[in-house]
Amino acid sequence: MSEKKYRIAILGASGNVGRLLLDLLIKREFPYESIKLLASKRTAGEKIEAKDGNTYTIEETSHESFSNVDIVLASAGSSVSKEYADTIVKAGAVIIDNSSAFRMDPNVPLVVPEVNADALKEHKGIIANPNCSTAPLVCVLKPLAEKYGVERVVVSTYQSISGAGKDAMEELKESSRKVLNGENYEPKHINKKLAFNLIPHIDVFMDNGYTKEEVKVIDESRKILGIPDLKITCTAVRVPVLISHSESVNIQLKSPSFVKEFKEIISSNPNIRVLDDPSQDVYPMPIMATGKDPTFVGRIRVDESQENTFNLWLVSDNLRKGAALNTIQIAESMVKQGII
Amino acid sequence: MSEKKYRIAILGASGNVGRLLLDLLIKREFPYESIKLLASKRTAGEKIEAKDGNTYTIEETSHESFSNVDIVLASAGSSVSKEYADTIVKAGAVIIDNSSAFRMDPNVPLVVPEVNADALKEHKGIIANPNCSTAPLVCVLKPLAEKYGVERVVVSTYQSISGAGKDAMEELKESSRKVLNGENYEPKHINKKLAFNLIPHIDVFMDNGYTKEEVKVIDESRKILGIPDLKITCTAVRVPVLISHSESVNIQLKSPSFVKEFKEIISSNPNIRVLDDPSQDVYPMPIMATGKDPTFVGRIRVDESQENTFNLWLVSDNLRKGAALNTIQIAESMVKQGII
């Protein structure tokens, strides 16, 4: 890495991902010169004691916030990213955006560094971070696509509530308490009641009957893997889990593999950890993946119903690889490639 | 139905399913002459006020319990069913068994009445009730197999804890309370911590890396549908839900269909209710299916990644169609067919 140090702004600093962005910048020793925390008026003025020993004060975001900034790490939702992206780019900074605003824009690289770091070279000031279910999935699919080719993928997700924000997390906790006490409640920050329930509906419905969340997994996987006609389908389901997304994935390869080799191939991604020993009841679960960086993969087994097909179960902290961690890994990759 | 009335014994009367068997016998006006409640020594002596106005006392099960009984509805686990099945048959009674003990025995009909009621004619005293994830699945697959042929099925389950018994249900509640209070706990009746977590492991692991639960869904679906070479695979996951199992199902048909026609075909099973209107945020969820008889199906949509393929989401009260309801429907079908 160069000796250069960067002036960072975190846009959406008071949210689940914003807090973690600050932690990870410090923990991973990203070469920052300064960190500016930006959020809406609602949380402006709040002070955050960071692990680098500094106390940062959240500032209200305005179009003047981005002078003297090199990198904006944004996690404040699509509308905020759309509002400020032009200003940020014109100010000479780069925005690495966690929202879905620019992901499918052909002029915007959508990047998981272990998968398509090269795409960063084409950036025009905006880089998109993928959806929280997409990022761990493509980490698994990439080495398989390179080694065997991927014929078709069927994904069912089991997504935690933290992706929907802190208020939604709080609602799951509070409503679970109410259900346990035999009390009724009305959902406010979650679209339906999630306590001890499942909601097969994340983001809005599209005309074809899919949710936007499902379409994101399909479209973003194709873009990141660089396989525009990848055969992939998805059912996305919200589960009453606080942090970490899980996915049941059925993968048909284009050529044969064996379980042992399959495990070796996906382990070639340094951010994947295979946790798979049925004899010892070892497999990934959300509560063990939470707070950890790797994408954990287990339950890897041959699907006898079709040639060259495997089932697996992956679990990943959606606030990390699905959001904050990947965002910082993008910034790290840009520094390493000397393109920032 | 004939005028005949039957002497019933419920084996495992103190469990989740046993209680519901008693309720449903009464509610559905099954022609019973008497009901005997049998369980282990632990709950013998407990009194149950039933909805027919009678108070029943649970008796300890012994090999002498089955004289003067016509139908035994068993839901006390495999070992209990294995212990008493011979005695029951020799006593001249019929056992309709909820456990997995006899399901794959070629001499034992495995029955979902709307799917294969004819198989009951071959019974030799033992009839098996399928696994709680299998029963609703075959209800959906049967009309599709008849109309289009089914090429291949990929299932991911989202299974509630009630199938694991009352102690496990209580543990999910108690442990959720502890997690909300920031306390630690050790699982006792569930194999791992389930509160705000997911466990991709139900029943024991087999040599091929699948769990027995997954193998049950595969093998039992083939047997009930009468398609021994049906291409089907399954990943079974326990979710922190109290009652009702859900399944994300990807179905490739052998010939083309359209969403509207697909819905009409599966609705031909009177126990299936299609709940599918994305424009109104209508789709099945566990908390709305609980306590209801139908299998609810929604999120029906074309899977563009493969010819003649559909995704759907089904939810069914696992204590009902997956257990007690189907057991009683088997008894009703036998009465209707005049084979008991």
Image: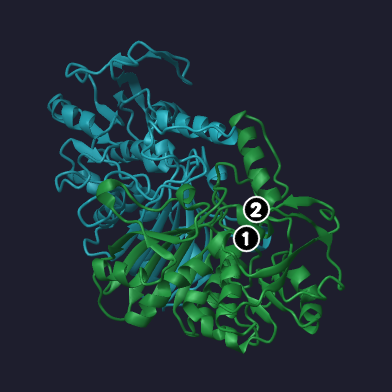
Chain colours: A green, B cyan
Label count reads 2
- What residue is shown at x 47% (from left), y 84% (from top)? A227
The outermost residue toward the top is B45
Residue A52 in sight from this viewpoint: yes
Q: Chain of mark 1?
A: A
Mark 1 is on which residue type? Ile
- Residue situated in front as seen by the camera: A328 or B68: A328
Q: Secondary structure at mark 2?
A: loop
Task: Answer with the quarter of the image where residue A252 lies.
Answer: bottom left
Check contact, mark 1 vs mark 2: CB within 8 A. yes
| Number of other residues with Cα within 10 Å of mark 1, as a class: few under 14, some 14 to 19, many 20 or more | some
- What residue is shown at x 66% (from left), y 38% (from top)? A174
- What residue is shown at x 56% (from left), y 60% (from top)? A320
- Give the image location of residue B59, x and y in percent: 30, 14
Q: Which residue is mark 1?
A: A26
Q: Which residue is mark 2?
A: A51
Q: Earlier in the sequence, mark 1 or mark 2?
A: 1
Q: Is residue B20 above or below residue A65?
A: above
- Give the image location of residue A3, x and y in percent: 62, 77
Q: Secondary structure at mark 1?
A: helix
